[in-house]
Image: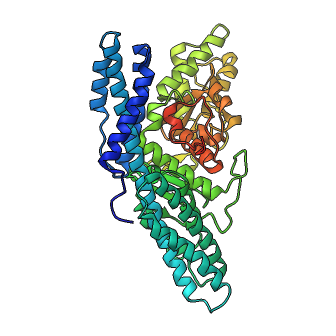
Amino acid sequence: MSDRPRTTGDVGAKDREREAKDVWCQKALGADPRVLAAEITGRLGTLTRVSKQLRAVGGSRVSPDPLAAAHSKASRGGANEQQLAALADVGGKVDATIAAAQKELKAIGNKAIVAGSIELINWAIEAIQKMDPGEPKNGLMGELYKCTKIESEIDTIKDVDAQQVACQELEKNTQALMNLTKLLGGKIDTRKAYEEALKKRYNINISVPSGMKNTHFDKVYEMFARVPVEHTKTSSLKTLAYTDESFAGTHQFGMYSYGSAKITMGDFGSTTYDNRGYTEPANSFSISTLHEIGHSVDDKYKIMKAHLGDCGGWQNETVDSVAKAVAGDFMAREGTTVSLPAKEVVSWVKDALTKGATDVPQDVPQLDGTTKKITKKKVAQYSDKPRTVKDADWASLQALLNKCVKMRMTEWPWGKSATVAISNRAYHESYPEEWVSYSVQARQALEVRDYQWRAPGEWFAEVYAYHWYHEKEAPGSLPAGVKEYLWKDPEK
């Protein structure tokens, strides 16, 4: 394909705007201006998201600000036909701008598909050329012809939607061709083919330790291709690095480094099928790949920052806010039966939250991809009675402090059986010296697996991976700004 994504040109853009305005003019007939203005506000939100996605993949810079200003001006007019006409004009321009941006996104996605497919086709050609005449070479040549024919025709298709259909057909046929070439047994290194296709399609840097074979590039390519291009070809996903080192006691792990735009994948071995705590069967390597893509999407578009309370009822806490919540709940329940000063209870609780561990070193992953050495308690049991506490009060206080120890990150407190809840909120340390809380009721309503509830970023990454892997629509209870990044039925 040519370097520039195909568009329908200025005439097409004017037609779209005219058609969109006609739709809004019909809506405006006899409408309440306030209702019309509210609907346009929602469409401006969509335009803001789409414009961010377009910029993220190097597309045109579309600013919603002029249209937002025009909307604000039209909304202040009197409730008359002139105001309705002004709102209809703005609504039409907003919808036309959204449509143009979405078409450009499709064009960029189409170009990426072709770039990756050409790389795979070239590798298949090389493999087929090494084969002896006859079968299966003749059959593979037939499959190869289908791919090259579609690829040669794509650049002649002017309509972006029709071009997208052809690109999807190219991808399906190319994958079928690659599946057949895998049967050639060593005559083609499909691992290298997929590695180069990933680089071409997503402009991503890839590093693999010498001698490491279990990269599963074919699965990475499949998962990257499953999600939209604005999720994968961005400045928040520039490096895919493999490591043969263990992490937190396992080689089977994935990690996204916030700020470094890097996914790190461990050695999952030759077999990747494992439930890994999910409620439905899952290929653990593939779903781990999607999980890390989800982190990069959240990093790029700041989804959980915008929807912290809407998704899981999350709140960022401090050790002080957690200590006050825990101590306050304790004193409200048992303050009349124990002779303990409230201020001292807060201090003891904070001590248990921060120091209730013995010297067992452990490397724990950080959000930036580094590790931090911390200590892990051998037995989650607080045994050091403060000197000023009476023996009669110690049993109640000790139980409270033991509960606090279980909130520490080293105790895997996001596990369902380990959840420590206070007044319908669960509190825990998500990462070293980082504290969060979430709604227990929200967890009961939507849980993929327990790791989802470690931190807000993990919440989104788990939901993202689950819905894209299983191709299931997100529940209606989620905000539109979150569902925008989850799988949607293309037939609807």
Residue 341 % position (x, y): 55, 13
| The N terminus - image quarter | bottom left
Residue 440 location, quadrant: top right
Quick one: 237 or 368, which is closer to the camera?
A: 237
Residue 216 seen: no
Residue 130 % position (x, y): 57, 89
Residue 383 location, quadrant: top right
Quick one: 251 or 226, which is closer to the camera?
A: 226
Q: How many marks?
A: 0
Quick one: 475 or 449, which is closer to the camera?
A: 475
Q: Residue at x 61, y 19 (%)?
A: 389
| The C terminus - image quarter | top right
Residue 179 % position (x, y): 63, 71
Image height check: is 91 above or below 345?
below
Residue 408 seen: yes
Q: Residue at x 62, y 50 (%)?
A: 469
Q: Is residue 339 left or right of residue 123?
A: right
